[in-house]
Amino acid sequence: MRGNILGVLFTVLSGVLIFLVVFAYTRSDRESPEFRFSSVDLVYDSKTVDNDLLVGVNAYDAKDGDVTGRIVVEKVVINREKKTAVVYYATADRSGNVTKQSRVFPADIADLDDNGEIPETPEEFMLPEAAAPTADTTAVQGTATPLTEGALQSSEGGAGN
């Protein structure tokens, strides 16, 4: 008899808990904010900063209202062939719903090249010839191992980069 009462009690409590979870889920904010862009005459060059890229960009959320102050510039990708800069924006509301959007601006490639903003070739990221490793040996924790160019490149391109 006592087992039946406990079984019924746990069943009723489980039903109430399920109802509360469903009720809370249906009332939660699952709608992402939306971006609104205004026309801006901007050419992306070496002097362009994030604040310049945020001019004319607004974000609104159905529940939180204006979330423009939470907009960030994630990254800028330069397209040399089309002479454009693609700017990626992101924003979030207070519930954690995130929206990402991109916008294209004309870019002054000559100015970016002159001021060193865009690397010419991937070789600029490699070690200079004078600093390239040779067949020297390097002591690592008391053992001598030959340091080769392949070993150096594989250690630099490891996980976490």
Image: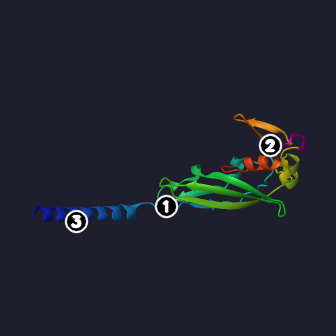
Q: In the image shown, does 46 or 159 lie closer to the viewer? A: 159
Q: Work out how far the residue at label 1 is from the one at label 2, CA to CA, in angstroms.
A: 59 Å
Q: Residue at x 75, y 50 (%)?
A: 154
Q: Secondary structure at mark 3?
A: helix
Residue 23, percent from left and from top? 34, 63
Residue 114, percent from left and from top? 88, 47
Tell me which amino acid carries mark 2: Leu
Q: Which residue is mark 3?
A: 11
* Mark 1 surroundings: few (<14), some (14-19) or many (≥20) residues within 10 A: few
Q: Which residue is mark 2?
A: 147
Q: How many numbered circles does the render carry?
A: 3
Q: Work out how far the residue at label 3 is from the one at label 1, CA to CA, in angstroms.
A: 38 Å
Q: Nearer the viewer, mark 1 or mark 2?
A: 2
Q: Secondary structure at mark 2?
A: loop
Q: In the image shown, does 22 or 14 lie closer to the viewer? A: 14
Highlighted magenta segment, given as a residue range: 129-133
Q: Which residue is mark 1?
A: 62
Q: In the image shown, does 5 or 141 lie closer to the viewer? A: 141
Is 74 included in the stretch rendered in magenta? no
Q: Earlier in the sequence, mark 2 or mark 3?
A: 3
Q: From the viewer's perspective, tell me whether residue 132 is left or right of residue 94.
A: right
Q: Earlier in the sequence, mark 1 or mark 2?
A: 1
Q: Nearer the viewer, mark 2 or mark 3?
A: 2
Tell me which amino acid carries mark 1: Ala
* Mark 3 surroundings: few (<14), some (14-19) or many (≥20) residues within 10 A: few
Q: Residue at x 50, y 55 (%)?
A: 96
Residue 153, percent from left and from top? 78, 49
Q: From the viewer's perspective, tell me whether residue 105 is left or right of residue 61.
A: right
